[in-house]
Amino acid sequence: MEYGREWKEKVKDYNTDCELSIGYNYNGSGYFELVSDDADNLGNGIYETGGLWFEGKELIDYDGVFEIPVSVLDSLESKGLDVKDIRESL
């Protein structure tokens, strides 16, 4: 699937340095992946991934995690996307 927009950035989440990848396409769906710098194949570190759903520029839903990481919301907001309702529901 080709995404309309994708980016990666270094963030601090759960008091750990992580790499955050986010992508979304213009049909209203997207993804996020948060991986700590110390993650490995043995299950150590942080690894969270999930789906994102948008109506226009508003994030309306997500799945894959019980609570969406704040760093995901911050990153989406910094790109001009509306996360207000999801942020208020946390």
Image (cartoon, grey):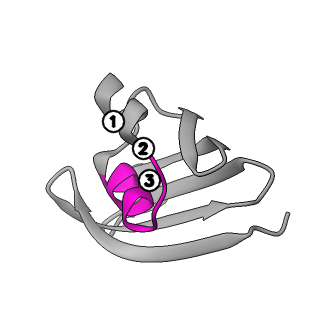
Residue denoted by label 2: 83
Callout 2: SS: loop
**Disc 2 residue type (three-letter):** Val
Q: CA distance from mark 3 to mark 2?
A: 33 Å
Look at the numbered discs 2 and 1 and tell me whether their residues touch, using CB distance below 8 Å: yes
Q: Is residue 7 visible?
A: yes
Q: Is residue 76 left or right of residue 15?
A: right
Image coordinates for residue 23, horizontal then vertical, percent:
62, 63
Queried whether the magenta region covers residue 73, the answer comes back as yes
Q: Earlier in the sequence, mark 1 or mark 3?
A: 3
Principal secondary structure, stretch drawn in magenta: helix
**Disc 1 residue type (three-letter):** Arg
Callout 1: SS: helix
The residue lying at 77 percent from left, 59 percent from top is: 26
Q: Nearer the viewer, mark 1 or mark 3?
A: 1
Image coordinates for residue 61, horizontal then vertical, percent:
57, 32
The residue lying at 48 percent from left, 75 percent from top is: 8
Residue denoted by label 1: 87
Q: Quadrant of the C terminus?
A: top left
Residue denoted by label 3: 42
**Disc 3 residue type (three-letter):** Leu
